[in-house]
Amino acid sequence: MASVEIYSKSFCSYCVTAKRLLQSKQIDFTEYAIDMYPPKRQEMIQRANGRTTVPQVFIDGRHIGGCSDLLALERDGSLNALLDA
């Protein structure tokens, strides 16, 4: 099973949507709440090539993108392959 990380903020509807998708697939993930632990925000920006919005999702260390990117992978059927790797 792939290692999944998600940088998020409290009260972010896009973060909730991304986490619900992963939970619906019974995927464990590590969540970094950047509003609760500010140093993680700078880490996220660096890892996500300058992106500052949340969520930012990583699968096996590979930057996937935000919620819409994750949903697009699900729609085109390629998310499962990444998660099963």
Image (cartoon, grey):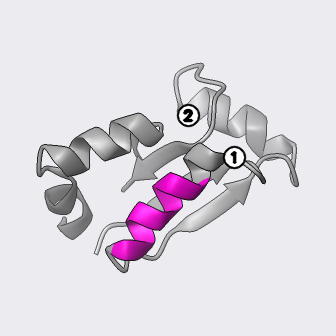
| Disc 2 secondary structure class | helix
**Element carrying mark 1:** loop
Residue at mark 1: 12
Q: Residue at x 44, y 48 (%)?
A: 58
Residue depth check, mark 1 versus mark 2: number of the one nearer the observer: 1
Work out whether residue 29 or residue 42 is closer to the camera in this orientation and state it: 29
Q: Main secondary structure of the magenta part?
A: helix
- Measured as percent of width and height from the top left, residue 12 is found at 69, 46
The percent coordinates of residue 34 (x first, y second) are 78, 47
Image quadrant containing the N terminus: bottom left
Instruction: Say if residue 5 shows up in the picture.
Output: no
Label 1 and label 2: CA atoms lie apart by 20 Å
The disc labelled 1 sits on which kind of residue? Cys
Identify whether 21 is placed above or below 10.
Answer: below
Q: Position of residue 46 (x, y in %)?
A: 62, 28
The circle drawn on residue 47 is 2
Q: Give the vertical position of 23 relative to 70 (above or below).
A: below
Residue 39 forms part of the magenta stretch: no
Q: Which label number is shown at residue 53?
A: none
Q: Tell me where the magenta segment starts and ends, as one range.
A: 16-24
Of the 4 image quadrants, the one containing the C terminus is bottom left
Relative side of 14 to 70, left or right: right
